[in-house]
Image (tube, grey):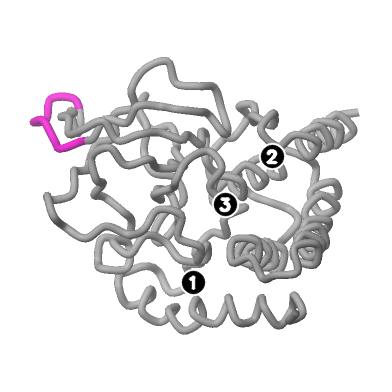
Amino acid sequence: MRTLARALALVAAPALLAAPAAALACSVVADYRVPTNLELAAEANAIVLGQVAGAAEALAEPGEALSGAIEVRPLAAIKGLMPGEALLLPGMALARAGAPTPEAGALDFAQPHPEALAGSCIRRTFEAGATVLLFLAREDGGWAPAGGPFSRWAEDVSGPDDPWVQLATLYASAAQVAPPARETLLQDQPDALQARIAAEADDDPAVLAMATDLERAMTAPGFPQLVARAPAATPVQTEALGELGERIDELARDGRE
């Protein structure tokens, strides 16, 4: 069996090769840095698993004409309170019938949706009926994409057990605890993932991808401190993490005392 370090290097290589394309696809300031997925989770006011219900219309600004939008039916709240009604996302649209769509559950967690790299900066089109994980920021009483250009603010997933949903839940939880506890919590995870690989005597692509992204988050500038660009005081739903969720709750209580 390959070592974890060797396997992580193989998984990370495509992301490194793709970086120049991302830089050319959208105009950003010279010192712009794409947020890590941990930073994305910290910034978001809400992280919602939902299903694209269809197209809709919304007012772009008071007094302005109607603009394109999509309606998303919430299925679960990973961070924040469960929305009581469908989410309306202005500036988004349904994908054209027959247009190719990315495979749900894509495992390159360093890369955003391909549409973000094709000139739009962020993903803006969705297939009707698709299950998506959304990182959202509050804006003018409504919801807007969190994270900025090239962030993974909206990705197709297979469901609540999808590796990207699991990783987002971990990051949302880690972002809520004090920096020392955050570092301890995340440093334990690569060892746990390596143990999973050893126990299964196989290289699970999902496990390797999660470990790769954890390493990326922990080597980003400023880790373990996080400076969220938007308030993030709403609760994180840790029940889905089982024993890990209980440990996160314990660390959060210790950080407040």
Q: Are marks 2 and 3 in contact (CB under 8 Å)?
A: no
* Residue 69, picture quadrant: top left
Q: Regarding mark 3 in the picture, which secondary structure is present there?
A: helix
* Residue holding disc 3: 163
Residue 96: image location, x then y, percent: 12, 51
Mark carried by residue 173: 2
Q: Nearer the viewer, residue 234 or 215?
A: 215
Check disc 2 and give the amino acid type. Ser
Q: Regarding mark 2 in the picture, which secondary structure is present there?
A: helix
Outermost residue on the left side: it is 65
* Residue holding disc 1: 31
If you read the primary sequence from the N terminus, does the residue marked by circle 2 or circle 3 appear first?
A: 3
Q: Nearer the viewer, residue 18 or 90?
A: 18
Quadrant (top left/top right/bottom left/bottom right) for the N terminus: bottom right
Residue at 37% across, 24% down: 141
Is 66 in the magenta?
Answer: yes
Residue at 33% across, 64% down: 114
Check disc 1 and give the amino acid type. Asp
Q: Residues within 10 Å of mark 1 (few under 14, many from 20)?
A: few
